[in-house]
Image (cartoon, helix red, strand yellow):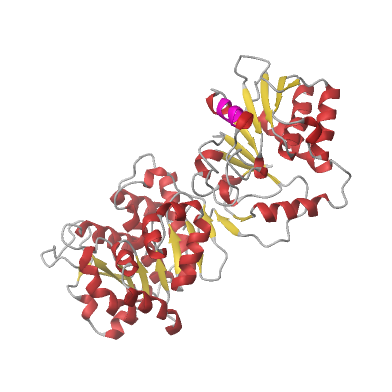
Amino acid sequence: MERVLSRADHWPLHGTAGSRLIEQQAMAGLEAHTLMRRAGSAVAALARALCPHARSVWIACGPGNNGGDGLEAAIHLLAAGLRVEVTLAADAARLPSDAQNALKRAQAAGVPISNERLSNEAPDIAIDALLGIGGHREPTGELARWVTELNELPCPVLAVDLPSGLNADTGQPHGNICVVATHTLALLTLKPGLFTGSGRDLAGEVWFDTLGAAPATLPPIAWLTNTGARATPRRHAQHKGSFGDVAVVGGAPGMVGAALLAARAAHAAGAGRVYVNLLDPDGPGLDTLRPELMFRPSWWEGPAEALGASTVICGCGGGDAVRAVLPRLLSSAGRLVLDADALNAIASDSALQQLLTARRARDRETVLTPHPLEAARLLDMKTGAVQADRLNAAQQLAERYHCVVVLKGSGSVVVAASGTPSINASGNAALASAGTGDVLAGWLGGCWSSTSSLALQAARQATWLHGHAADHSSFSPLRAADLIEAMHAASPA
């Protein structure tokens, strides 16, 4: 058993259907009930580790095998000397065979089991074994009652496999009633819903136990990324031209700061030269904080060869003015990062959409960095529909526009067309501050330019470092200008 984010790694994620198949494969060749007993032992061990001085535990068990895991845990916790109370929200006669066996074993061991709470006192720790991945709708009736009571407890709550009421595949609750756990012990597989959308808030700290099963051979539906690539040491003979040119096109009147943030980030990420093409004709000609940035009015109208050789970041604070520059950039830019107002302009213009999708046929890579509302506009759907299934929405975007997509938000999703999505494990709400998206777009462009990596690699690296810097910052919210310096300091050496 281990805490998932305790080490840098790429973790395979399996949805409900895949997890059930992997469970069947793991059970093959084992004696009956073995897997559930291992699960119960693991849950009990984690509960004791989390609260080593606990004297009492309440376990809320539901009508499926998740409840059976809780019953098996009760046996171990009772044997360890804790005061154990089990609430069984189920008809015992209709439990699955494994759970029925666990119930008989718990009864024989003397575990107090009732359909009501036997004590009015709050336990030292509570265990949610109500639904797990077996829940497909919002908890109702007595299940809803026990979810509500779990959420009102002042003690830690450990969810078995998945907080009850959470969708394992999407990271969104099935309705308004869902367990808010302080810890979740995922069993056999890690589910994507634990790491994106609302799942990160509802699952708390995630732990993982394979229950002794061999590694799954089933391809994952996504990967959890909790690492950044180490930087390649710069050779002595390299010069600024070795790390590429980045041009930032944006900064309409009143929004110059967005373009400057992107440009500063691109420079800090390692780009050899950074040009700033402000769309505000009265904008400044110098960044006094970073005078190394080179201001080039109308850079986008320059030679096609220069555009083709550059990494272009377009849209940061672009306003309506960005519409005029997009046709040229979509047609001529070599590497292109599209953010903010560039995405909104493309979403409302079919001609721009055609130019965007045509880039792939000309071997020109593009990265889109939408937040959920921008993604919804590009997909012509409601924001709620994007958030309801973030993995699917990001995949749709990548395939529709033949791009790499970074769908920002809690558990940002990074995916290329026809590829397997990855969920970024780093980051927190300290990034919920104006300008941090401009920093991500700029850093992505600078990383892409300086490393000569593929677009997908640059997107994953930039997204992870963006969140990693926030995770290690002592400030919340993290101001965008400070974020650039935090990312620069946290860059893998």
Q: Tell me the residue at 77%/22% (across/down).
A: 78
Query: In the displayed structure, does residue 29 sit left or right of residue 286?
Result: right
Q: Is residue 129 above or below residue 386?
A: above
Q: Position of residue 144 (x, y in %)?
A: 59, 31
Kindly give the residue lying farthest to the front in the view shown.
141
Q: Dominant secondary structure of the magenta stretch? A: helix
Q: In this view, does 60 lie above or below 427?
A: above
Query: In the displayed structure, does residue 252 sit left or right of residue 470?
Result: left
Q: In this view, does 440 lie above or below 247?
A: above
Query: In the displayed structure, does residue 324 sit left or right of residue 204?
Result: left
Specify start and end residues of the magenta stretch as a single range.
144-149
Q: Where is residue 464 in the image (x, y as percent from the top left)?
A: 47, 55
Q: Does the magenta stretch include residue 279?
A: no
Q: Which of 28 and 393 is in front in this view?
A: 393
Q: Nearer the viewer, residue 234 or 177?
A: 177
Q: How many labels does the image show?
A: 0
Q: Position of residue 334 (x, y in %)?
A: 37, 79
Query: In the displayed structure, does residue 206 sit left or right of residue 384?
Result: right
Q: In this view, does 380 lie above or below 24?
A: below
Q: Quadrant of residue 68?
A: top right
- Residue 9 visible in the shown view: yes
Q: In which quarter of the image is residue 95?
A: top right
Q: Position of residue 216 (x, y in %)?
A: 73, 57
Q: Nearer the viewer, residue 308 or 108?
A: 108
